Image: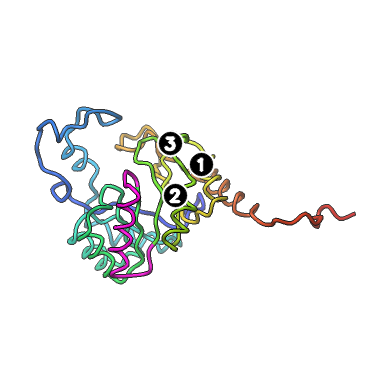
Amino acid sequence: AADAGADAVKFQTYKADSITLDCDGEDFIIGEGPWKGQTLFQLYEDSAMDWSWHKALISEARVQGLDFISSAFDARAVDELVDAGVDAIKIASFEVTDHPLIDYASRAGLPLILSTGTATKDEITEAVRVARGGTENFSLLHCVSAYPAKASDYRILNIPDMSKDYGVTIGLSDHTLGYGVASGAVALGASVFEKHFTIDNSSGGSDDFFSATPESLKTYIETITESWESISGPSFDRTEAEQY
């Protein structure tokens, strides 16, 4: 990730029993999409990271010049991340209505990132209200919780709308397979970008099939950087290159 030009890495800190029940009832089986047929518990248990890895990963991130961020899914995860020394805490999209978690994380003394996939405007407003009870140091990521997501579903005009309404830094949690949505988001004011990342699309991880590889992440970062550098004006004076 560092070699590709990233500024930070983000992991997820949870245990399967903090998110769901070990149950194979109809409401606990994934009905559509890439994980169809799995129970929620199976998916989360297979994807969970051993918490004992945190400090070693943070140490390596420091060596690589990267910030280390993780998503917390309950209060014990927040405590674990604070103790480990993370640089920021994220609240994942499906937890954006978990007000006790947002309140607890907002009081941890660290920057907070809230992702907004699946959330209605009223739910985002409520999450912002709760976060502001503990901190003003937070940002929102516009997100579509589909894996992968279609560009046509992304409604990136939500970005300036949220910036106007909430007055905080707005970013993009990008689940698309291309670069166009991110480039458009830059032009609309997004300044934090998140991508799923893997070393190899065929290595067997639960999100490997749509994640950015080192090569595609490098191109992604170069694309949004170029988009950022192009934003100036309006001005119709000749540029320096156009002077004769």
Q: Position of residue 240 (x, y in %)?
A: 81, 57
Q: Secondary structure at mark 3?
A: helix
First along the sequence among labels 2 and 3: 3
Hey, what amino acid is under mark 1? Val
> Which residue is painted at 40% across and 44% down in the image?
197
- From this viewpoint, which residue is outermost toward the right? 244
> Which residue is painted at 15% across and 44% down in the image?
20
Asked where in the image residue 131 lies, by quadrant, the reply is bottom left
Judge the density around disc 2: few (<14), some (14-19), many (≥20) Cα neighbours within 10 Å: many
Estimate the spatial distance between the alpha carbons at disc 3 and disc 1, rounded to whole Å. 10 Å
Please tell me whether mark 2 or mark 3 is closer to you in this view: 3
| Residue 191 shown left or right of residue 104 in the figure | right
Verify CB contact (< 8 Å) between mark 2 and mark 1: yes
- Residue labelled with disc 1: 181
Residue span colored magenta: 117-138
Hey, what amino acid is under mark 3? Asp
- Residue labelled with disc 2: 172
- Residue labelled with disc 3: 153
Q: Position of residue 63 (x, y in %)?
A: 42, 62
Q: Position of residue 105 (x, y in %)?
A: 26, 64
